[in-house]
Image (spheres, helix red, strand yellow):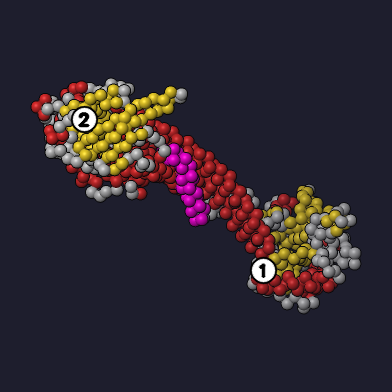
Amino acid sequence: MGFLESVRMALRALGANKLRAALTMLGVIIGVAAVIALMSIGRGIQASIQAQIQALGSNLLFVSPGAQNQGGVRTQAGSAPSLTYEDALAILESGRVPEALGVAPESGGFAQVVANGQNTSVRVTGVTPSYEEVRNFHTTVGEFITKDQVDSRSLVAILGANTKTLLFGEGDAIGQTIRVNQQNVAANLRVVGILEPKGSGFGGSQDDIVLVPITTQMTRLNRARTSRGGFTVSSVNVQLADDKVETSTLAVQNIGDLLRERHRVIQDDFTIRSQQDILNTATQITGAITLFLGAVAGISLLVGGIGIMNIMLVSVTERTREIGIRKAIGAKRRDILTQFLIEATVVSVLGGGIGIALGGGGAQLLNGLSFGGGQTLNTVVSLDAVVLAFTVSACIGLFFGVYPAVKASRLNPIEALRYE
Amino acid sequence: MQRDVGQAGGTDPGDVVIRADALSKTYQMGDVTVRALNGASFEVRTGEMMSIMGPSGSGKSTLMNILGCLDQPTSGTYWLDGTETSKLDDDELASIRNRKIGFVFQQFNLLARTSAVEQVELPLLYAGVSQRRKRALAALDRVGLADRSHHRPTELSGGQQQRVAIARALVGEPAIILADEPTGSLDSRTSEEVIAIFQQLNREGITVVFVTHERDIAEHTRRIIRLTDGRIASDLTIPAEEQRIARTIHAPADALA
């Protein structure tokens, strides 16, 4: 018997009990729609995180201090006070890292900021003028930290957009004084600039910050020093000449050589991460999230498949007599098997198609949904998810249809004909 | 065996189409062995019209199942149209049923929600032959239902449903038509019509075997085999002039009324 005739026969059999067919399909519809929608959301989150990382500024390297070994216990990465302001300057000025175009060391930590009767805890970061270019922070009002301010350890500060609003509301903040209290060392700083809003970034809002000259941070606020007397920094951003992978690789090597020599160590007491590393990590994490969401949805697809099997078993029992008739007039086992398999597959494929439409539609509805912090969700209905969902639903029909179909094909025609 | 094949059926005696040789069938019901068929032997020639009669429990259903290749004998051999069937597997039996046997059942056994012409096409579908629609319509025409080809079983009277079943049985040009109580669900007038169709088909050369417990029905055939306790008790051929001839087929429009 031809395939098309089998499909027609299956459609007629399903049409005979439309409500039941629809309910059976519902399991697959919900499963496939969930897979598509959740995977689209996962992809959307992935895309948005990637975009954020790229927005940090392209072709960047991040150098941070390594972990400390204290009595054999390895502490948190970045906790060792091994990276200094001088290290940062050396990367650019020694001439040993020709790939470096700019260097922006930063140093800081959370501090209590009091002004205008308001009080907030934000990250206070000591920066150099190059930070503006390297990290893409620009002021809307006032000036960025200048070289003079760094050299003279000026008591000035630039406020992030949120911090400004929090402390001063809509009022003018330039020229006002804020009190910064970090690790029991306090200083009064004059506001000289306001940053443009950057939105929520990788690792917290980039608007809840205060920027100060790095020398001010190191001498007036946080006076941490290395064992050799240098001012420690919490990280050094290195801007590269271009975003080629070779440039990045060479730079990582050269900076590593330089720092190992300066620190007189064999084993690295620092970490260099390229933006690509961060991107890879983020992609891995979001990929795992997407997979997890898909797996959860996949379970509902499985349940839908079991629903198909259940209904097909009922259908085989109900149609025992029909099977007997078909066998009496010459249907072979294979004919009956094919008939019921195709019926199950038609249910799951139809359900899969509707589910893809619903899931895709749902993802479209969620598209552009704001999830706070000025971020919006961009759902991505990818072709591979659609193909996967469709294939899986067809396979589920086949898989869960096999047992009922085999059962039908093995019926004894005499008993089947006698069945009431 | 006493019969005069020269006078059997409406046509010249043909080749042997059924040869049953010492057919036996036993069933195991728990500890009890039931001997449903106990050494039945007979032959049927092409073009015969005959009945297998017997009360319930006489083994006629078992014999009918074996003749119809739905079942196989425990011992003995059954040749259908030159094929020995006792060694065949399920699929080969299905193929034999498809090509050589046309079934007509008491309960019509039509598929629900399927038009008459599609019912008749079904055996051809499983046989994988071409020109199914044309042949199915021709078969429906032979039973006088050409104008009902797109009606579904629920839209047809009992007699019409049985005629669709007959068309389905003959569409594949089988070696025999096996009819199991073909009038058991019909009133007497409709029964006559249906038997008339069988007689007409037999006159056209088709071998017809009735399985029935009704003497009235059996008397419409030239030869009657009686079964008792799984054995053939008698095998009689009625003289042609004593065979009951069913009244002619009503016009299809009449039959619906």
Q: Amino acid at mark 1?
A: Asn
Quadrant where the N terminus of chain B sits is top left
Left or right of A78 on screen, residue B100: left
Q: Where residue A204 sits: x, y (%)?
A: 70, 54
Magenta stretch prevailing secondary structure: helix
Left or right of B20 on screen, residue B216: left
Q: Where residue A399 sits: x, y (%)?
A: 48, 44
Assess whether mark 2 and mark 1 are in contact (beta carbons under 8 angstroms). no
The image shows residue A304, relative to residue A256, as above or below, that is above
The answer to if A403 sits in the magenta stretch is yes
The image shows residue A275, relative to residue A411, as above or below, that is below
- Report in which chain the residue with disc 2 lies: B
Q: Amino acid at mark 2?
A: Met
Q: Which residues are magenta?
A: A383-408
- Mark 1 — residue? A59
Determine the residue located farthest toward the left in the rendered image. Answer: B241
Out of A304 and A43, give the one closest to the viewer.
A304
- Tag of residue B226: none
What residue is rendered at 19% in x and 25% in y? B217
- Tag of residue B1: 2
What residue is rendered at 58% in x and 44% in y? A296
SS of the residue under disc 1: loop
Q: Where residue B54 sits: x, y (%)?
A: 26, 23
Total tally of numbered discs in the picture: 2
